[in-house]
Amino acid sequence: MDRLLSVDQVAELLGTTVRFPRRLIEERRITFVKVGRHVRIPESAVSSFVADNTVEPVTVRPVTRLRRAA
């Protein structure tokens, strides 16, 4: 079974304030579980969220300058 994290733990894991994971929950952008009145986020959902929102660096080719005829 996947470990369930509190909102505070998710915020610490992501290096953000508690407000950010709460917003993700409110906007339904991350999977969460209601345990009574408590909200828990599966650890795999946090990993998936990070993977889905990771932006790979762009490889830039060197720019060759065109020489004008003098």
Image (spheres, helix red, strand yellow):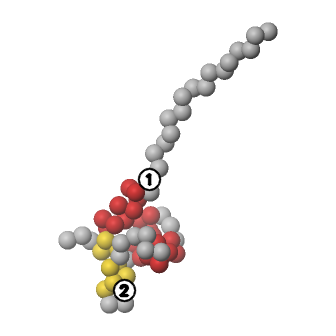
Q: According to the image, label 1 marks what residue?
A: 54
Which of the 4 image quadrants contains residue 40? bottom left
Q: Pick the quarter of the image with the C terminus.
A: top right
Vertical placement of residue 38 versus 42, above or below: below
Label 2 element class:
strand
Q: Is residue 8 at least partly visible in the picture?
A: no
Residue 28 location in percent, x, y? Answer: 43, 74
Count neighbours of disc 1 (C-alpha within 10 A) and say few if under 14, some if 14 to 19, many if 20 or more.
Answer: few
Answer with mark 1 or mark 2, whichever residue precedes in sequence: 2
Label 1 element class:
loop
Q: According to the image, label 2 marks what residue?
A: 38
Residue 3 location in percent, x, y? Answer: 26, 71
Count neighbours of disc 2 (C-alpha within 10 A) and say few if under 14, some if 14 to 19, many if 20 or more.
Answer: few
70 lies left or right of 11: right
Residue 46 location in percent, x, y? Answer: 37, 65
Task: Residue at the far top: name it.
Answer: 70
4 lies left or right of 20: left
Vertical placement of residue 48 versus 26, above or below: above
Residue 50 location in percent, x, y? Answer: 41, 59
Q: Is residue 57 at least partly visible in the picture?
A: yes
Task: Residue at the far bottom: name it.
Answer: 36
The type of residue carrying mark 2 is His
